[in-house]
Amino acid sequence: MGDQADGAVSPSTLRRYLLPFRVYTLWAEQRVRTANPPLEVIAQACASRGVTAQHNRPLTTDYIADQVDDFERRWHALTRHHIETQQ
């Protein structure tokens, strides 16, 4: 992964992972309320908070739908970890 001895994260790595993380955060806010967060609501939340695709294009429900399996897996891993640390 390059010769970055100081452990800094490269800008290309941030660009690749920042958008899904930001969308996941909005998805998770809805996931607390319902097992199947409405993709339209998440897309609207992205737009209202300035979370956009490349060249400032609005995120589509298709993009969000493509991420849902990863989001759900992350959701279960994080909630399981939270429960285990609370015991």
Image: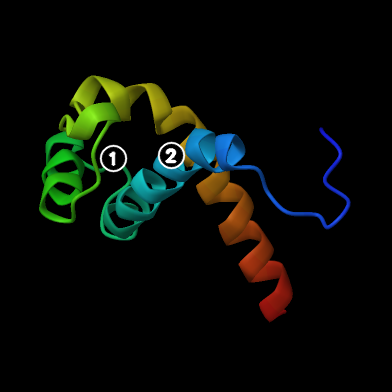
Above or below, 49 against 1 in this view is below
The location of residue 63, given as percent across then percent down, is 30, 24
Above or below, 65 against 7 in this view is above
Q: For mark 1, what is the residue?
A: 36
Residue at left offset 28%, top offset 40%: 36
Q: Nearer the viewer, residue 17 or 39?
A: 17
Q: Which quadrant: the N terminus?
A: top right
Q: Nearer the viewer, residue 56 or 70?
A: 56
Indicate left or right for 82 with 28 as reference.
Answer: right
Q: Residue 68: which quarter of the image?
A: top left
User: How packed is label 1: few (under 14 Cα within 10 Å), some, or many (20 or more)?
Assistant: few
Q: For mark 2, what is the residue?
A: 20
The location of residue 56, given as percent across then percent down, is 19, 35
Disc 1 and disc 2: Cα gap in Å? 18 Å
Amino acid under disc 2: Pro
Residue at left offset 12%, top offset 36%: 40
Amino acid under disc 1: Asn
Above or below, 3 against 75 in this view is above
